[in-house]
Amino acid sequence: MLKIENLTAEIDGKTILNGLSLEVAAGEVHAIMGPNGAGKSTLSYVLGGRPGYEVTGGSVTFRGQDLLDLEPHERAAAGLFLGFQYPVEIPGVSNVQFLREALNAQRKARGEEVLSGGEFLKLAKDKAGLLGLDMDMLKRNVNVGFSGGEKKRAEMVQMGILDPAFAVLDETDSGLDIDALRVVGEGINAIMRAPDKAVLLITHYQRLLDVVKPDRVSILSKGRIVKTGGPELALRLENEGYDAVMAEPA
Ligand code: ADP
Ligand code: MG
Ligand code: MG
């Protein structure tokens, strides 16, 4: 589903991704772990096409298409979803308005019918229920005054509504207490665990991986993937730390 080959990217002339290669197959949850500053968030921004992140080499193929050739909205319409480490607040725009606009923009881009207000509300209610988020929260302005946990739940409701083929989730567990972590993790499973979908799950912690069990785990360090293994790799990182695990031969 996603194939990244020898990707290099820079910000302000500084190389951040430095020959990164990674493959994620349909049906997989692939966890990315790595020290602070390794380039994890940069990888998610580059996949999303964020301005300022300049790709200087390599390729990214998404569902057979050259992802880097697509505009950010075209990437979304092609089935890519990005969850952010720090969700933004949008004063003056309600979640319901925002989500309906986002969904209908994607549907139009795919040549599909847009949803009526009623159809949309039914869908939103359904997904909010899955994440234990009250519909009243969705009527409030996007993320304004939301707790960390509420922002993450709202983001997972957004993911449920957009129903992407591929989700890149950057530290979705940051700022979550144990209960919220479980709800969000189970939400990710419910929305994204399917044979025709895949997830790139960026996290520092095993506790999210206890809920969203990864098929593959890769360590990102200094802008490249230095080790890939099964779920046991995450457990070893938790017990032994990055330095010990990365010091071994790949
Ligand atoms: P991670 O998410 O793994 O903690 P990041 O992708 O956020 O790492 O950052 C990778 C490196 O890029 C860090 O050294 C960071 O300081 C640098 N970096 C990130 N954003 C910028 C920026 N806007 N300008 C310059 N350097 C940046
Ligand atoms: Mg970080
Ligand atoms: Mg980060």
Image (cartoon, rainbow, N blue to C red):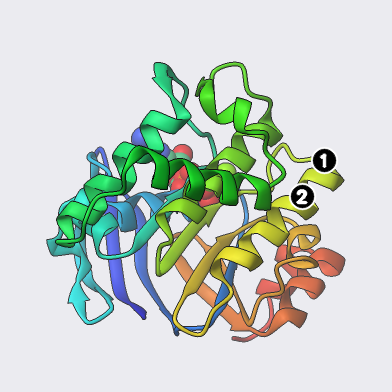
Q: Which mark, residue 177?
A: 1
> What amino acid is at disc 1?
Asp
| Number of other residues with Cα within 10 Å of mark 1, as a class: few under 14, some 14 to 19, many 20 or more | few
> What amino acid is at disc 2?
Leu
Q: Is mark 1 within 8 Å of ligand 2?
A: no
- In the displayed structure, does residue 214 sit left or right of residue 1? right
Q: Position of residue 230 (x, y in %)?
A: 68, 85
| Number of other residues with Cα within 10 Å of mark 2, as a class: few under 14, some 14 to 19, many 20 or more | many
Q: How many marks can you see? A: 2
Query: What is the quadrant of residue 144 in the picture?
Result: top right
- In the displayed structure, does residue 148 sit left or right of residue 155? right
Q: What residue sits 40% from the left and 54% below the top?
A: 162
Query: What is the quadrant of residue 196 in the picture?
Result: bottom left
Q: Which mark, residue 181?
A: 2
Q: Position of residue 184 (x, y in %)?
A: 69, 51
For label 1, the SS is loop
For label 2, the SS is helix
Camera-side residue: 60 or 145? 145
Q: Is mark 2 within 8 Å of ligand 3?
A: no
CA gap, disc 1 and disc 2: 6 Å
Q: Is residue 240 above or below residue 230?
A: above
Q: Position of residue 212 (x, y in %)?
A: 70, 68
For the residues labelled 1 and 2, say whether their Cβ atoms are less than 8 Å apart: yes
Q: Is residue 115 visible?
A: yes
Q: What residue sits 82% from the left and 40% below the top?
A: 177
Q: Is residue 241 above or below residue 229?
A: above
